[in-house]
Image: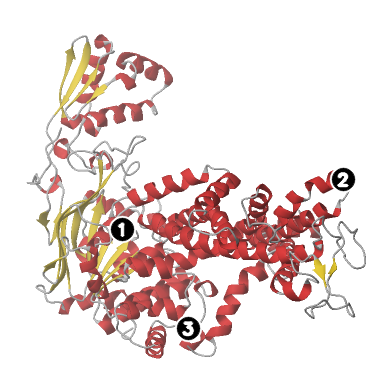
């Protein structure tokens, strides 16, 4: 490929973004900023968190040394209020809430990424095949997927987690697979329906008339015209996955204690709330809400951008040329220009 | 005039064509589509005969035009010839080899030699591929080029050839970046890049502006001369067909009604349908304003229940007794008549026939069970004697029948193609020749 090919393709990929309306772009930007903050927490958890996720004692400079030469550790205070040493307070198990939230971000992101890989890896190829082949394969797959889809997500995740106990140790991977199983039908449905419509496009028949085998048609002609809906499902599902993971953790089917996970922390903090220690439940809950909001904003924004039908006229990224209100302009203008003309006082 | 292929040049090429050199031959080719009915899609066994026992041949180097109204099956026929739609019966002989029994897998290597140019350039290019990828893809599919640089060079050469120059400006663009006329040039480039022998062009200029049309047509004819192509040119526009085609086949409801050299067809059409189509061509001549255009009446009939006998007979201005009149035509006649008579006549006549929805209609008979025989009998006999409608030419008898009135019809065979004045015509006006493979009428 020549040097020109690279930038031209990047430019092509970014075109929907530039054509999107301002609102959609702001949704995406706001959502991305929130999500990125959590992503940074997740990636650099060890550097950012002052304590480990299940650390209840800490080293103090100049502390006396015990018999083995190790420094004597100071215990983290129980149920300390949010303050200087512990910005979000501490729990009754002497854990630092802020550190647990930072480490919880890592679990949340790990599960989102892994569950998406599982859901996409199964849902997208099956959707493509089902939509393109049609017939009995399609009917069978739709039946199976619909059967899975009728379960409430959380219930399905619990069942999946229960089944997975037999094969996987409880922890991040098993929680991720349990969450991922919930979203397979969503990818499947969207991709299958989109494939059904793209399959009817003349360029697919053109590919056949050129002698392309089905695999090439599916890979080069159908897939690349269907794949644009994946980011939308991904971001919306990611938000949902965070909630499902928290729900699993809350019910005790997610990652095992004392690993930091927001849902789990909220669940363990319920009794604290009654006794007046609000911070142990509040901050994990806030983290869940913020991340879900961020991901949803990205998803909704992307939905507007990728689905051109929702694009609002007038925000095409170009400044429309103003016509002089002459007789000619009146004749030439169609209904698109009615607003323009209304402004200039012709209509 | 000599360099550019005008209408005249286009037709004169035919002179050098050897009659025996047949590239593609359709032999009794049919394509039926099953009609799905009911919730479970079980099907009633009904079929739409999109292409019905069509035979013709296309010679090397010629442009064969396939003309018909929408719904005539011309696109399906074009696709069937390329095996993009499987034929129900009959043979497609490409250079003597029957394509009909070949599987999709066996067809794939042959697709290098059989190309298709689409009607709508906006939809027939993959929006996710750059131009060099899209146009060059056939080369990679058939393993003609082995490296990207090679493909790029070939695509650039082809783009220059179809008039997209400098090619370097187009190679890395996406289809959405260029105009409709340019896209159609791309579609042509993509179809011809594998150097095919036979090209089906399915209304290649129908979606283009008038100004771009002529240029694309000239390009297609230029390429035909340079690359030695054979075209099947599908169009609904006889004026375009006259400009580009050496021979023309007129398709009506899936059957060829007339085919032959385009000049003989245009100068002296022998089938009433061809005449009607030619009359429909608008000419900028004020003297012709009030001429009698013998345009076909009504719409193309339902392909699911095509008329018996000659399929054109209900709309034909010259249909007579053997054309295949049937019960349904009488009902159509009555409904048509009632839109023209005054209200009193309508009241009286509709009271005499009883409700038309209760009438029993079959191929050879119509029975009005709720009729008032004392009024209907004389009415129908008068209409028959007055030849009020062409349908009465085939009415055999009007009788009283079990309290109602029955009308019986004469037999009307399906017309077969017969040679008339240097072309093939399927019309009883030139002598009643029944199709041997005529279906048994239920």
Camera-near label (3 vs 1) is 3
Q: Nearer the viewer, mark 2 or mark 3?
A: 2
Quadrant of image for the N terminus of chain B: bottom left
Query: Residue B160: x, y in percent?
Result: 41, 86
Q: Which residue is mark 3?
A: B171
Tell me the CA gap for discs 3 and 1.
31 Å
User: Can residue B259 be seen from the camera position used here?
Assistant: yes
**Can residue B388 be seen from the camera position used here?**
no
Say whether disc 3 or disc 1 marks the residue closer to the N-terminus.
1
* Left or right: B282, with B179 as reference point: left
**Crowd around label 2: few <14 · some 14–19 · many ≥20 (10 Å):** few
The answer to whether tags 2 and 1 share a subunit is: no
Mark 1 neighbour density, 10 Å: few (under 14) some (14–19) many (20 or more): many
Identify the residue at horizontal 21%, vertical 61% (top origin).
Answer: B265
Count of numbered badges drawn on the protein: 3
| Chain at numbered mark 1 | B
Label 2 to label 3: alpha-carbon separation = 71 Å
Front of the two marks 2 and 1: 2
Which element carries disc 2, helix, strand or loop? Answer: helix
Snapshot quadrant of residue B300: top left
Asked which colour scheme the image uses, the reply is secondary structure
Q: Secondary structure at mark 3?
A: loop
Label placed on residue B75: 1
Q: Nearer the viewer, residue A157 or A55?
A: A55
For disc 2, the chain is A
Front-most of A119 and B284?
A119
């Amino acid at each position: 490929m020549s040097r020109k090919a690279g930038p031209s393709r990047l430019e092509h990929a970014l075109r929907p973004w530039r054509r999107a309306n301002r609102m959609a772009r702001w949704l995406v930007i706001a959502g991305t900023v929130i999500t990125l903050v959590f992503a940074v927490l997740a990636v650099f958890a060890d550097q950012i968190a002052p304590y480990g996720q299940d650390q209840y004692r800490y080293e103090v400079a100049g502390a006396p040394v015990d018999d083995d030469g190790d420094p004597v550790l100071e215990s983290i205070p129980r149920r300390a209020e949010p303050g200087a040493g512990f910005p979000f307070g501490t729990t009754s198990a002497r854990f630092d809430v802020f550190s647990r939230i930072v480490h919880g971000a890592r679990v949340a992101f790990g599960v989102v990424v892994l569950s998406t890989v599982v859901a996409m890896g199964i849902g997208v190829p099956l959707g493509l095949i089902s939509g393109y082949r049609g017939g009995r394969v399609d009917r069978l797959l739709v039946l199976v997927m619909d059967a899975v889809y009728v379960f409430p997500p959380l219930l399905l995740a619990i069942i999946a987690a229960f089944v997975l106990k037999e094969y996987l140790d409880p922890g991040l991977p098993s929680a991720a697979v349990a969450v991922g199983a919930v979203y397979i039908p969503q990818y499947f449905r969207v991709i299958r329906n989109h494939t059904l419509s793209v399959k009817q496009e003349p360029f697919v028949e053109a590919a056949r008339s050129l002698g392309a085998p089905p695999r090439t048609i599916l890979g080069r002609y159908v897939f690349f015209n269907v794949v644009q809906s994946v980011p939308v499902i991904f971001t919306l599902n990611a938000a949902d996955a965070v909630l499902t993971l928290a729900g699993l953790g809350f019910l005790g089917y997610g990652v095992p204690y004392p690993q930091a996970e927001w849902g789990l922390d909220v669940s363990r903090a319920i009794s604290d709330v009654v006794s007046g220690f609000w911070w142990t439940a509040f901050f994990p809950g806030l983290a869940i809400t913020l991340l879900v909001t961020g991901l949803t904003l990205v998803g909704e924004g992307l939905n507007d951008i990728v689905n051109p039908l929702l694009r609002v006229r007038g925000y095409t990224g170009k400044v429309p040329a103003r016509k002089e209100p002459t007789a000619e302009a009146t004749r030439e203008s169609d209904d698109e220009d009615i607003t323009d003309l209304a402004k200039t006082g012709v209509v | 005039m000599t360099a550019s292929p005008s209408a005249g040049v286009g037709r004169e090429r035919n002179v050098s064509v050897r009659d025996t050199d047949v590239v593609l031959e359709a032999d009794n080719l049919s394509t039926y589509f099953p009609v799905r009915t009911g919730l479970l899609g079980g099907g009633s066994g009904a079929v739409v005969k999109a292409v019905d026992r069509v035979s013709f041949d296309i010679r090397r180097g010629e442009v064969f035009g396939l003309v018909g109204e929408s719904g005539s099956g011309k696109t399906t026929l074009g696709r069937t010839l390329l095996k993009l739609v499987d034929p129900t019966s009959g043979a497609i002989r490409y250079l003597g080899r029957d394509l009909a029994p070949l599987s999709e897998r066996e067809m794939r290597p042959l697709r290098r030699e059989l190309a298709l140019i689409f009607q709508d350039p906006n939809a027939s290019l993959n929006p996710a591929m750059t131009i060099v990828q899209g146009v060059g893809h056939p080369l990679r599919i058939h393993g003609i080029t082995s490296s990207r640089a090679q493909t790029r060079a070939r695509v650039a050469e082809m783009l220059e050839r179809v008039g997209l120059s400098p090619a370097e400006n187009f190679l890395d663009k996406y289809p959405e970046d260029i105009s409709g006329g340019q896209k159609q040039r791309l579609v042509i480039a993509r179809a011809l890049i594998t150097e095919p022998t036979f090209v089906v062009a399915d209304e290649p200029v129908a979606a283009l502006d008038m100004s771009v049309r002529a240029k694309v047509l000239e390009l297609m004819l230029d390429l035909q001369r340079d690359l030695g192509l054979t075209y099947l040119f599908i169009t609904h526009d006889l004026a375009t067909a006259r400009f580009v085609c050496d021979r023309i086949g007129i398709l009506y409801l899936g059957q060829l009604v007339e085919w032959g050299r385009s000049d003989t067809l245009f100068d002296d059409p022998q089938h009433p349908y061809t005449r009607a189509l030619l009359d429909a061509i608008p000419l900028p001549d004020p003297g012709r304003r009030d001429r009698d255009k013998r345009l076909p009446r009504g719409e193309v009939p339902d392909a699911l229940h095509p008329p018996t006998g000659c399929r054109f007979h209900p709309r034909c201005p010259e249909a007579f007794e053997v054309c295949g009149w049937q019960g349904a035509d009488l009902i159509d006649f009555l409904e048509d008549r009632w839109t023209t008579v005054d209200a009193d006549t309508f009241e009286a006549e509709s009271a005499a026939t009883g409700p038309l929805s209760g009438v029993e209609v079959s191929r050879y008979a119509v029975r009005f069970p709720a009729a008032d025989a004392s009024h209907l009998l004389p009415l129908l006999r008068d209409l028959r004697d007055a030849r009020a409608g062409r349908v009465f030419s085939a009415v055999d008898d009007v009788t009283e029948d079990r309290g109602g009135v029955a009308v019986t019809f004469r037999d009307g065979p399906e017309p077969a193609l017969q040679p008339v004045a240097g072309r093939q015509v399927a019309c009883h006006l030139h002598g009643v020749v029944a199709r041997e493979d005529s279906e048994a009428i239920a």
